[in-house]
Structure formats: structure tokens, C-alpha cells
Amino acid sequence: MAATDDSHHHPSLKRQLGLVQATCYITGGIIGVGIFIGPATVLKGAGSSVGVSLTIWVVSGFLMYCGAMCYAEYGSRVPKSGGTYTYIREAFGELAGFVFLWTQLVLVRPLAVLLSCLASAEYIIRPVFLNCPDMAPADAKILLGISILVITVAVNCYSVNYGAYYQTLATFCKVAALVVIIIGGFVHLAKGNTEHFDEPFKTNSDISPTSVSLTIYVCFYAYMGWDNVTVATEEVTNPKRNIPLAILFGLAISTVIYLSANVAYHAALTNSEIMSGVAVAVMFGERVLGPVRWIILPCIGISAAGISNAIIFTSSRINFVGGRDGLFPELFSMVNINRRTPMPSIITLGILAMIYMCIADFVTVLGAYSFLRAGGEAVAIFGFRRIRRKHPATEKTFVTPTILPIIYSVASIVVACVAIGSNPRSFLPGLIIALLGIPLYYLARTQWWRKGLPARLHYKITKLCNAVLLCDIATKAINEE
């Protein structure tokens, strides 16, 4: 009988990730292109003060730690995949979950792709205009960004393996660039070049609420990725001990690396040089790295483009699953019969990113994206008490101190209110588009939507994808094998 009972046990994930592996997983998910494009904006928002800017990086890291600890508890309480979407839906219902998905589809993911492509374009073009950065044509950056976007979309449509190969190259380039920058900066500092740190907390300009809010959101962008901690919750050994320690160590390592890179920048460059553009590593390479800069700067460009590659891959799969499960139009669940890639989902994401690239500037998009991304995570954490009541703790549940979600929630509300109140033109449009998901949620449940003009239009687009892109609904394509 014992053997019979065992045979009916469902397979489960094996707990095999120790503290070191879990820490590396979190650190690798956080460190990205933000450290290459964020220091200029953060320094401006800090009133050109080295000490204030470094303090903001540390405070932002602590706030991310508070949010990550909340998600660690969510992962042990809510036995469902879906991350932020699942937590919002569990806490506030289906409408709130739909609004979150809508925002991700039309704003957050396309803006993330846009930022990465423009950052890559900036690092490719900026060295050509090193001594006159203001003369670098904006149109050329946009065209190059669009070219990078088109190539990335094409690669993801053509082959999953090609995209994976490029991602491996981009990861290597990111690590190599950071290592060289930090070592180069500290060597420069060790030679006695400490004059830029003489009065670290002296400000050369006024610090306004607008600049502070944008600065914090830029730091939030650099720390994005901490929410991925819930993906590995079920595979971590001794989770009550290792998960909070992995989060602490992962964010501490990321913060130290970010601080080290900023110290390296400030050791070699003046404040005006750092604030001359988002591509701060270009000026750093010219000043410190010598001929090596012609290796490192392309590495940063490749790394930035690699972020867009990763976002397109993961986001298109989320849209694909949403279409297959009925949350999004069935169009998104179509895959190419030969290549087995979700082409309609990938192309839709690319088109939206291209449209935004043509109508918005880099800094505004950076603030808007971070505001919307952080807003979704904040809403999920606002429902902390509801999720605790709905999913009672067991002996295996990791329980985070209640003060941490309170700190994160209060900080998120304050920063969001200051951002909207001081600069509504940058943040309100995205918020309004997100809230359009509310009427759309109810509209999608009407007979007109399901059987009227939208349904007929969707049918025609589906047929077009079938004929032109050689795509079919995922379940059909799989069954034909």
C-alpha cells in the first residue's frame, strides 16, 4: 500500500539552491544597464553633491530590500505563479489584476525595451561626439535605437537559440565593463586623486521635489529585478534562513557594486563631466581607460541591447501565456509553425516600443517607466494584510517583519505623490493610460466586444498572421505534431 500511495504523489520542485546560489541568482537579476545610465540623472537630482547622490543609492537599496522581503513572504504564502499580477489579484480582485496586466502590455514592457535600445544607441554614438556631446543629433540616436530594436525583434522571431547566444554575450560584456570601470576608478583614486571628495555633501544647485522624485525612480530602475526572488522560493534549501539572507546579501552586493562604480566615476570625473549626458562611462573611458575604452564602450552598448533582448523574450512569453489562457486576445498565443516563436506577441511589443521611441525623450521615459513599474509592486505590497488573512501562515511560511511593508508602502506613496504633484506632465499620462484598463475590463465582457466589431477585427488579424507569418494557435500547432 505504501508503494501505491507513493505512486500517486505529484512531482514537485527539489530544494537544491543553497545560500550562495540564491544570492547569485538575486544579484544577477538586479545588476543591469541602470548603473551605466543612471549616475548623471541621480547626481543632478542630488544638487551635484557626491555625498547626497551616494546616500540616495543606499536608501534606494534599503527600500528595495523592504519590498523584496515582502515578496519573499508572498512566495511562501501564495502557491501560484505570476508574481506581481498574482499578488495584486489575490489582494484586490480580478479587476485590479487586469489593470496591472493592461499596464504591463501597453506601457511598462515597451518602455523597458525602449530604454535599453536608446541606452545602447547612446553608448554607440556618444564617443563620436566626445568633446561636444550636445551636438550629438537626437534623430540619429532614435534611428539607431530603432535599428537595434528591429534587429532584436528579428532575432527573437527567428530563433530562440540565437537570442540566448546573444544574451550570454551581453551578460559577459556587462560583467567585464563593470569590473574594468571599478578597478580603473579605484586605481585612479589610489594615486591620490581625491579632490572630488573634499566636500562630499556640498550642493551646487537647489534640490527640488521634482529632481528628488526622479532621482529615486532612476535608482529604482537600477535596482529593478529584486521581485524575481519569488521565482526560486520553492527551490531554496532551508528557506526560512536562506531566503532573507540571500535577499540581504544580494541587495548588499548590488548596492556595493553600484556605490563602487559611482565612486570610480567621481574619482576620475568632475560633476559637470558626469552630468554632461547619460553615457557617463564614455567620459570615464576617455579619462582613465585609454585605448581599453574602445573595448569597454562597445561592451556597454552590447550589454544595454542585451537587456532589451531579455525583456522582449520574457515579456512576449508572458503575453503569449496570457493569450493562451484567455486573459489577452488569442492573437498573442500564436506561434510560428516552423520557428516555434510567438511572433505576433514579439512584433506587437516591438511596434509599441517603436512608437514610444518616436514621441518621448529618454529621461522622461526613464522616470515614467520606473514610476509605473514601482507602482505595480507597491500596489501588490499594499495588499500585504489581505494576503496574510487570505493565506494563513504554516510552519513552512517565511514571515517578514511587519515594519518592512509599512516602510516600503509609505515611501512609495510619498515619492509617487511628490512626483505627480511636482511634474504631472511626466507621470500623469502613464497613470491615465493605466486607469483606462478599468473601463476596458468591463467593455471586454460585453456581447459587442465578444461578437461585434472587435471580435471580427481580431479574427481578420489572426487570419493575416496565419497567412503572412505562418503562425497558428499554440495548442493547434502542438497537437499537429
Image (spheres, grey):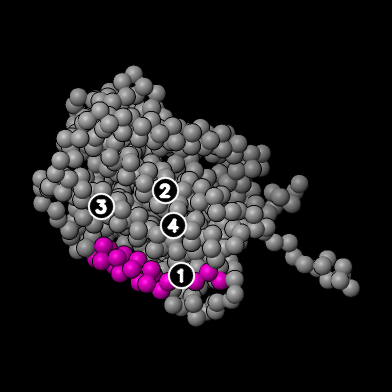
Marks 4/3: CA–CA distance: 18 Å
- Identify the residue position indicated by label 4 in the image: 248
Residue type at mark 4 is Leu
* Residue 27 in the image: above or below residue 322: above
**Picture coordinates of residue 68, whole percent (x, y):** 44, 61
Magenta stretch, main secondary structure class: helix
* Residue 176 in the image: above or below residue 16: above
Residue at position x 50%, y 81% from top?
389
Q: Which residues are magenta?
A: 397-417
Q: Is residue 46 visible in the rendered structure shown here? A: yes
Tell me if residue 408 is in the magenta stretch: yes
- Identify the residue position indicated by label 1 in the image: 400
SS type, badge 1: loop
Q: Residues within 10 Å of mark 4 (few under 14, many from 20)?
A: some
Which numbered disc flags the more N-terminal residue, 4 or 1?
Answer: 4
- Identify the residue position indicated by label 3 in the image: 55
On residue 341, the disc is none
- In the picture, measured across the screen, residue 422 lies left or right of residue 107, that is left
**Picture coordinates of residue 215, whole percent (x, y):** 25, 52
Residue type at mark 2 is Ile
